[in-house]
Image (cartoon, rainbow, N blue to C red):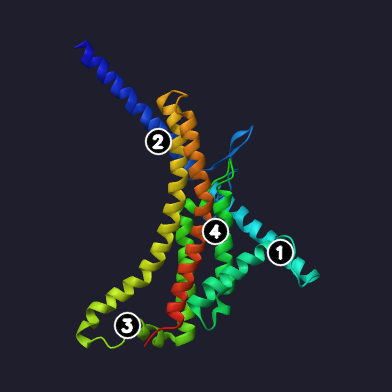
Amino acid sequence: MNNITDTLAIADTIVSVKKTDSGWIMHHIMDSRAIELPFFGEVHIPQFPLLFGIDLTPTKHVVFMWLSALLVLLVFATVASKYKKSIVPRGIANFFEVFILFVKDEIAKPTIGKGYEKFLPYLLTAFFFILFGNFLGLVPYSSTFTSNIAITATLAALTFVVTQVGGMMQNGIWGYIRGLMPHGIPWWMMPIMIPVEFLGLFTKPFALAIRLFANMLAGHTVILALIGLIFFLGTWVVAPLSVAFALFIYLLEILVALIQAYIFTMLSSLFIGMAVHQEH
């Protein structure tokens, strides 16, 4: 009887430790009203006054989203000032011109085609905003706001709006709606195709939101889980292996940060091109 009791007690301890470890990981990944700072620990964000009964106090994801937007403005204000002084870009202007030309020549121009210039400002803004946000999340004590489904859904919704408005401006409202139907299908298939095509309009931004959210969330979860193995097992023997694997995933996250910004911009450009230049 004592053996059974001891076994149950050990099992309860293991379960409680696992719950604690899981909570520790989620605490660092999920959004909150506090920001972690070196030497200060958690600093709670000051409470904002209610506006019409709505709490507008920002969370840490919102704070880092603002920081990413501010960095984009400051960086490209500096880049623009460099071009005013010299036609030939140098330094930071030369560095970011590579990315600008890449988005222009390798993403927008091939996927949208004629008239891509109208959508280039949005694509560049989305690309650098996501890119800066992804890299901010790799800085210690920071937070990855692109792992928040609310933020990625908002970015996808903006792509959805730009896609629909661009398609209607190019083809007219009725022409755009009519162009959603594949050309030459029999009339008796229309009751099936209309809801399918209508749902297709919303599955595209849904895929954009989930793809960015899931990839950024997964990488940070794996890194924290590998580091947590040291404390979960309660021994330093696994520390070298855990740290080595965590460092490898961290380096891989740098590549993922670039790839996810590219994929979001590429798919957004592709959806815009399909709406603007419909095949009849």
| Residue, far right | 85
Cα separation, mark 2 vs mark 4, equals 27 Å
- Tell which circle, 1 or 2, labels the residue nearer the N-terminal end: 2
What is the x, y in percent for residue 113?
A: 51, 81
| Residue tagged 1 | 93
Q: Is residue 209 above or below residue 6?
A: below
Q: Residue at x 24, y 15 (%)?
A: 5
Amino acid at dot 3:
Met
What is the x, y in percent for residue 201?
A: 37, 72
| Residue tagged 2 | 22
Q: Can residue 55 be seen from the camera position used here?
A: no
Cα separation, mark 3 vs mark 2, equals 48 Å
| Residue tagged 4 | 130
- Tell which circle, 4 or 1, labels the residue nearer the N-terminal end: 1
Query: What kind of element bears circle 3?
Result: loop
Query: What kind of element bears circle 4?
Result: helix
Q: Nearer the viewer, residue 109 or 28?
A: 109
Amino acid at dot 1:
Ala
Q: Residue at x 43, y 31 (%)?
A: 229
- Tell which circle, 2 or 4, labels the residue nearer the N-terminal end: 2
